[in-house]
Image: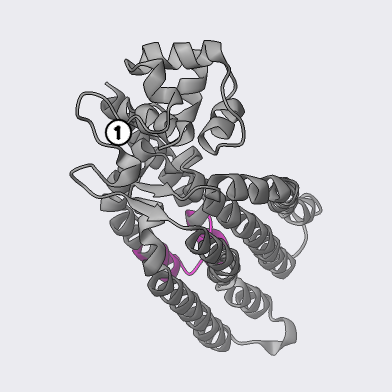
């Protein structure tokens, strides 16, 4: 077993992330990452520090033929009670390809959900104002048909993606190791993608921020109600495009993080994700039921859309708090 594998084994045995090990050794996380991917080797001072931190000899770290001390077996060799799967170069490339294509599909599904009430809001505004002789019953009928068709299409996309991604669930959920050279390849691909990710997030945020501008201007000019509802539809379209871009680039980046076991995909974070999953499905079912109930009862479809951004913010806040609790519990 080479030095890179031994550093990974000992770091994980102590429950340390790359960032935490880097802090203890007074180096950057990138330096630790390069050691673990065998792109570079630590100097003698760092080897001595690691030997003391890991409570092993320098001979164990530096000599490939010496195995783990005290009868411990290497996680990377599958010697733990729970076998650790090793991701090959072929599997890593297959996953990155699938994640890139899947990111586009999921982003389309999310966009369809946001766009689903657009036609209903637009036609309801026309019916209320009497423009184009659109009746209220016609507006509701056509609008609801389109809404349910778009939601159904989005659900089909999500279910299809979920079933197709089952073969890669172990990368997202379980503990695994990567074959020699995989980490270096993934880091190279991620570095190439960073500029696209930053550009996509920036563009998506700008679209979401600017989406409310036409509606604000219309309100300031006291525009007719049908203009306000039309601009509400435009708002949702701009938000949908912005969210599509952000979801797509974020899913691609998360694929790299999964393979590197960084960010939200360290072993500790995965345990936090499992805790979040316990209430996630119930939460969104309740939100959807509340949205539809409020919309049908009040018939103010131009206002009830606010449920989704509020629910999203609350979900992020509660999920973050739950993950922080699990993280602190595991580290303590």
Label 1 neighbour load within 10 Å: few <14, some 14-19, many 20+:
many
* Residue 272 locus on image (x, y percent): 33, 40
Whether residue 299 is visible, yes or no, is: yes
Question: Which residue is the site of mark 1?
Answer: 326
Q: Nearer the viewer, residue 46 or 328?
A: 46
Residue 5 drawn above or below residue 45: below
Q: Quadrant of the N terminus?
A: top left
Residue 111 appears left or right of 9: right
Name the quadrant containing residue 139.
bottom right
Q: Nearer the viewer, residue 63 or 313?
A: 63
Q: Quadrant of the C terminus?
A: top left
* Residue 100 locus on image (x, y percent): 60, 64
Q: Residue at x 30, y 24 (%)?
A: 331
* Residue 160 locus on image (x, y percent): 43, 77
**Magenta region:** 289-307
Name the quadrant containing residue 74.
top left
Asked if residue 220 lies in the magenta stretch, the reply is: no
Numbered label tally:
1
* Residue 311 locus on image (x, y percent): 44, 50
Whether residue 297 is visible, yes or no, is: no
Q: Residue at x 45, y 24 (%)?
A: 62
Which element is circle 1 on?
A: helix
Q: Nearer the viewer, residue 237 or 331?
A: 331
Q: Residue at x 39, y 64 (%)?
A: 288
Residue 138 appears left or right of 52: right
Main secondary structure found in the magenta portion? helix
Residue 129 drawn above or below residue 229: below
């Amino acid at each position: 077993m080479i030095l890179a594998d031994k550093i990974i084994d000992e770091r994980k045995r102590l429950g340390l992330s790359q960032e935490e090990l880097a802090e203890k050794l007074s180096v950057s996380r990138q330096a630790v990452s390069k050691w673990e991917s065998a792109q570079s080797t630590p100097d003698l001072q760092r080897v001595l520090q690691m030997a003391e931190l890991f409570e092993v000899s320098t001979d164990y770290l530096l000599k490939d033929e010496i195995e783990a001390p005290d009868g411990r077996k290497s996680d990377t060799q599958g010697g733990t009670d729970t076998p650790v799967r090793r991701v090959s170069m072929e599997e890593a490339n297959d996953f990155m390809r699938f994640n890139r294509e899947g990111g586009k599909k999921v982003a389309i599904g999310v966009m369809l959900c946001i766009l689903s009430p657009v036609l209903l809001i637009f036609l309801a505004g026309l019916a209320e104002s009497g423009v184009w002789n659109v009746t209220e019953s016609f507006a509701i009928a056509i609008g609801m048909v389109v809404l349910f068709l778009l939601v159904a299409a989005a659900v089909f996309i999500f279910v299809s993606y979920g079933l197709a991604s089952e073969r890669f669930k172990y990368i997202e959920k379980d503990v695994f190791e990567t074959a020699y050279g995989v980490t270096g390849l993934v880091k190279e691909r991620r570095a190439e993608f960073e500029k696209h990710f930053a550009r996509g997030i920036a563009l998506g945020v700008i679209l979401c921020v600017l989406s409310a501008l036409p509606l604000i201007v219309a309100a300031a000019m006291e525009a007719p109600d049908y203009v306000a509802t039309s601009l509400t539809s435009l708002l949702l379209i701009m938000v949908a495009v912005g969210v599509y871009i952000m979801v797509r680039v974020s899913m691609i980046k998360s694929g790299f993080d999964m393979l590197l076991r960084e960010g939200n995909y360290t072993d500790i974070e995965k345990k936090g994700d499992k805790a979040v999953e316990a209430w996630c499905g119930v939460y969104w079912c309740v939100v959807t039921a509340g949205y539809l109930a409020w919309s049908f009862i009040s018939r103010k479809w131009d206002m009830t859309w606010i449920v989704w951004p509020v629910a999203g913010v609350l979900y992020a806040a509660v999920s973050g708090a739950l993950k922080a609790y699990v993280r602190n519990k595991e580290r303590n």
